[in-house]
Amino acid sequence: MDDMMDAARLRLCSWGIALTSGASLMLSLLFTRMFSVTMFYHFAFLLVSLAMLGIAVSGVVIYLLPRVFAPERRLLLAGVFAVAIAPLALLAMRVTVHSPLTLDLQSQNLIRLLKLYAVTSLPFLASGFAISLVIASAGKHIGRVYAFDLLGAAAGCVVIIPLTPRLSAPGAVVAAAALAALGG
C-alpha cells in the first residue's frame, strides 16, 4: 500500500475513532441521567459497569478469536460495529424508558433489571469492539489514534452540556447514535 493511502486511511480512522468514542461517552452520561430519572438514583451507577463490561468483553473476544478479527478485516469490522451502535442505542433507550423499576422485592423487578442490563450493554459492547479494533490496527500510529480517541471522548463529555437542554436526553441519545454511525 502506498503512503498516500496509508495517510488517508489513518486520517479516516482517527476521525472515526474520535466520533465513536465521543458518542460512546455521550451515551454513557445520557443513560446515567435517564437511569436516574426513570429509576431510582442508585441504579444510575449501573452504567459505569455496563461501559466497562463492553470494553472488557470486546477486548477479550478479539484476543480469543484472532481468525474472526484478522488484521485485514479489523477496520471494516470496526466500521460495522460503530454503525451498529446507533440502532443498539435507540433500542437501549426504548427499553430504559419502558422498563421502570420499583423498590419492591418482586421477581418482575429482577427480570426488568436483567433485561435492562443486557440491552443497555449492547451499544457499549459495539463501541468497545469498534474502538478496540481500530486501536489493534493502528500499529506504529497508535499514539495518534489513541490521542483522537481521548479527544473524541472529551468532546463527547463537553457536547452533552449544551445539547441535552436543547434536545432532551432522548433527543441527545439520537444525536449520539448518529455521531457513532458517522464515525463508522
Image: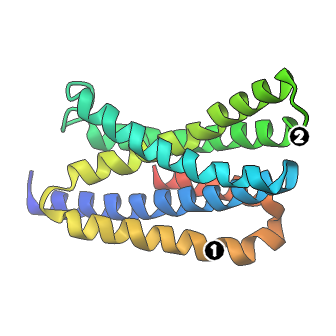
The answer, for residue 170, to whether it is visible in the render is no
The colour mode here is: rainbow
- Residue type (three-letter) at the residue carrying disc 1: Val
The answer, for residue 76, to whether it is visible in the render is yes
User: In the rendered view, would you say 154 is above or below 49?
Assistant: below
Tell me the quarter of the picture where residue 89 sits: top right
Q: Which mark is residue 159?
A: 1
User: Where is residue 58 drawn, in percent x and y?
Assistant: 39, 38
User: In the rendered view, would you say 35 is above or below 73?
Assistant: below
Between label 2 and label 1, give the one nearer the viewer: 2
Which residue is depicted at the point 30% across and 65% down? 146
Question: Is 87 placed left or right of 149 in the picture?
Answer: right
Which residue is depicted at the point 40% across and 70% down? 150
Question: Is 164 placed left or right of 129 in the picture?
Answer: right
Viewer-closest of 129 and 19: 129
Viewer-closest of 98 and 15: 98
Q: Which mark is residue 7?
A: none
Tell me the quarter of the picture where residue 65 sits: top left
User: Where is residue 51 drawn, in percent x and y?
Assistant: 53, 49
**Residue bearing mark 2:** 103
Which residue is depicted at the point 47% across and 59% down? 21
- What kind of element bears circle 1? helix
User: In the rendered view, would you say 165 is above or below 111?
Assistant: below
- Residue type (three-letter) at the residue carrying disc 2: Leu
Mark 1 surroundings: few (<14), some (14-19) or many (≥20) residues within 10 A = some
